[in-house]
Amino acid sequence: MNVIYPLAVPKGRRLTCEVCEAPAERVCAACTVTYYCGVVHQRADWDSIHEKICQLLIPVRTTMPFYNSEEERQHGLQQLQQRQKHLIELCYTVAQKYLFEGKHEDAVPAALHSLRFRMNVHGLNSVELVPAYLLLAEASLGLGRVIQAEEYLSQAQWTVLKSTKCSYATHSLLHRNLGLLYIAKKNYEEARYHLANDIYFASCAFGTEDIRTSGGYFQMANIFHGLNKLDLADTLYTKVTEIWHKYLNEHYQVLSQDRIQQIDLLGKQFETDTGLDEAQEAEAIRILSSILNIRESTSKKDPEKTVFVLKTLVMLYYLMMNSSKAQEYAMSAFSLAKEQLGDDEEIATQELLNLISGKEFHPITQDP
C-alpha cells in the first residue's frame, strides 16, 4: 500500500476521507483518486476492499474526456455506469462475505463503497440503496453499535415505504435485518414477527426450498434454540440442512460423474463449482458449521442427523476445491456412521470418503 499526500486542489473543492468523510490528508499513490484522513482509515479501507478495486476506481473518478459527438458521449456515460454497477456488486459481495465470516469491522468500508456507488447510479432516494443500508446495519450490530444499526435500518425502512417498486427479495432482507436487531435487543417476539415476514417474502421471491430462504429458517431456529424450544429448533435446523443438501447434491452428482471420467474432451481435469458467489459460500459454511456444532453438543445426540450435516459439509468443501476440509468432514462422518449407524450408512459414507480422496470404491465385506 503506497501513500502520497494530496497536492493543492481547485479552490472550493474539499477532499474528504473515504471512510469517515473527515478532511483528507492522504491519497492512495496507486490510483490517486482515493483520499483518507489518516493512516488508520487508509489501512482499514485497503484491507477491506480498496486493494481489490484500486485500479477500477481510476476511470470512474477521473474527468470524462471530450467527445466529438453526442453518440460518443452517451456511449462513454453507459460505460461509466456499467463500471459503477460492477463496483456496486463487487463491494456488496465482499462486504457480505465479511459479515458471514464474522469480520464486521472489515465489512464497513466495502459496504460504504457499495452505498456511494448506488447513490451515484440510482440517486439518493432509490430503493436500490436499501441492500447497502442493511449491510451497514448488520455490521453495526456485530460491532455492538445498536443505535447506529437502528439508524441504518430506519433509513432502509423509510426508503422502502416511499418506493412503489420494492422487490420481494429486498423486503426479505429488510425483515431479516430487523429480526437480527430485535434478537440483539432480546425482544424475541418482535424478532419472530420479522423473521416470519422474511421467510414469507423470500418464499415469494425464490420459493420455500431455496437456499436464499434458508437464512430466515436458520435465524428463527436460533431463536427457538435460545428459548430452549428444542423440538421447534430441531425441525428448522433439519429443514435448513435439507435445503442446502439438496442444492449441493445436484452440483455434486454432476461433478462426481465427471470425476469418474477423469478428463474432458480436451484432456483437462474438470474444475469444481458450487454455483455460489463468495458471500453465499461463506454463508453456507457459517450456517452448516453452526448446525453441526449444535448437533454435536446437544444432550440428546442424534448421530443420523449429525452425519447428514457432515455429508452436506463434505459436498460443500469438495465443490469449493478444499479437499483437506472435505476429507476431514468425510472421515468424521465415516467414523460416526461406523460406530453408531448401520451397514448401509457406513458403506455410503465410505463411498463418499473414497470419492473425494480419488480412490476406487470397494464395498465393505463382513468378516466370516
Image (spheres, helix red, strand yellow):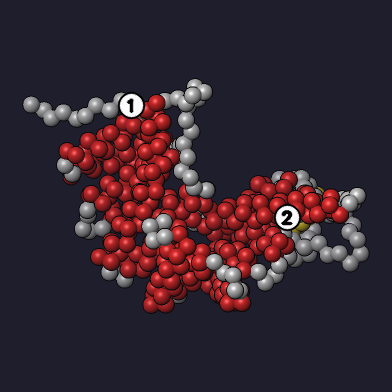
Tell me if 312 is positioned left or right of 59 in this view. Answer: left
Q: Which residue is mark 1?
A: 359
Q: Which residue is mark 2?
A: 81
What x and y, as percent, mark residue 98?
54, 54
What x and y, as percent, mark residue 175?
48, 70
Compared with 215, 2 (above or below) is above
What x and y, as percent, mark residue 113?
67, 58
Q: Residue at x 42, y 55 (%)?
A: 211
Q: Quadrant of residue 327?
A: top left
Q: Quadrant of residue 153?
A: bottom right
Q: Residue at x 22, y 53 (%)?
A: 302
Dot placed on the residue nearer the N-terminal end, 1 or 2: 2
Front residue of 129 and 162: 162
Numbered disc 1: secondary structure:
loop
- What distance separates the C-alpha of mark 1 from that of mark 2? 50 Å
Q: Residue at x 66, y 51 (%)?
A: 86
Tell me if 80 is positioned left or right of 212 in this view. Answer: right
Q: Amino acid at mark 2?
A: Gln
Which residue is the extreme one toward the front?
71
Tell me if 332 is positioned left or right of 247 in this view. Answer: left
Numbered disc 2: secondary structure:
helix
Q: Inspect this view and state whether residue 184 appears.
A: no
